[in-house]
Amino acid sequence: MVFPETVEVDFIAPRHLAGGGDPAWVTVPLHRACGWSHGDDPLLPRVLLSSPDQKALLRLEPDPDGQWWTLSHAAEPDRPAWYASFGAHTPVELIAAVTDTLTTPAPAPGAPRDPYETLRHFAWSPPTIGGEGLVSPHGTAYVQRLGSAEGPGAWFAEATLDPDRRPIWQARFDEHTSPRLVAAFTAALADPKPLWRPSSRRSVPARAEHVVTRRSVDVRTSLVASALEGRAQSLAGRRGNSPADAIPPRRPAAKDSRSR
């Protein structure tokens, strides 16, 4: 079988409306570069990945009424248990920013710690009609930290074309999630660089077509095919090992539960 030398790719902006993308962008590097083990249950349409220390669990499960991705972490001496969740159309690059930060031993130099910092840098502004949080320049994404008299609470982000309609996707981080992880998510969310998606797949939600900018480019097939491998190699390098070295002996599948 002969494969074409090039493939058409769409570069889509704003990135929060690019569609979910390939889940392997998150799951494969976690397994290959970070040693997360996975359960094997071919009869169920879900993925479970657990960290080598068995403290973190990533769950991907199609749920038409809720969040498709859930990342939960057990309690540690300096932090209670926490979790984050992401809707089906959350771009995988935003989720990967969280898992990459979680699995990297030390913060990258200059990495933001305040989740609002990068948003302000890219001209996100407070809502025009009162309220807390920041809104993207396009008016199609919103980030807020909830709170009460008892103190600050969970972080909440969403992409929507109309505040009165169901959001395209939502992301939630409970109040115990490290600000460093939330900041990694918001930095990836605010990044003005477009995301690429194969032109053959309809990734942008239909009702967002009139808002996005789409630029189609012919890219060498070999570059597209090697993108995921390159990402795994890069993440392994940040951790100081190789993808092959990072895979530990097979562990039992993680328990089917969520830490709260």
Image (tube, grey):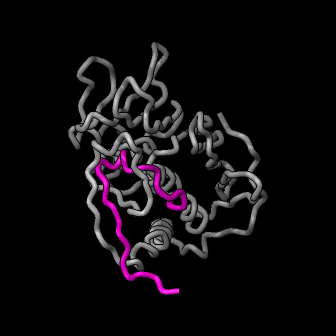
Frontmost residue, 178 versus 11: 11
Q: What residue is drawn where x is 53% and y is 72%?
A: 241
Position in image of residue 154 (x %, y %)? 48, 29
Q: Is residue 50 left or right of residue 236?
A: right
Q: Is residue 92 left or right of residue 46?
A: left
* Residue farthest toward the bottom in the current orientation of the protein: 2
Position in image of residue 227 (x %, y %)? 43, 71
In which quadrant will I find the C terminus?
top right
Residue 134: quarter of image = top left
Q: Is residue 102 above or below residue 74?
A: below
- Magenta stretch holds residue 213: no
Position in image of residue 175 (x %, y %)? 51, 30
Position in image of residue 94 (x %, y %)? 43, 50
The answer to whether residue 174 shows anywhere in this view is: yes
| Magenta-tinted stretch | 1-25
The answer to whether residue 79 shows anywhere in this view is: no
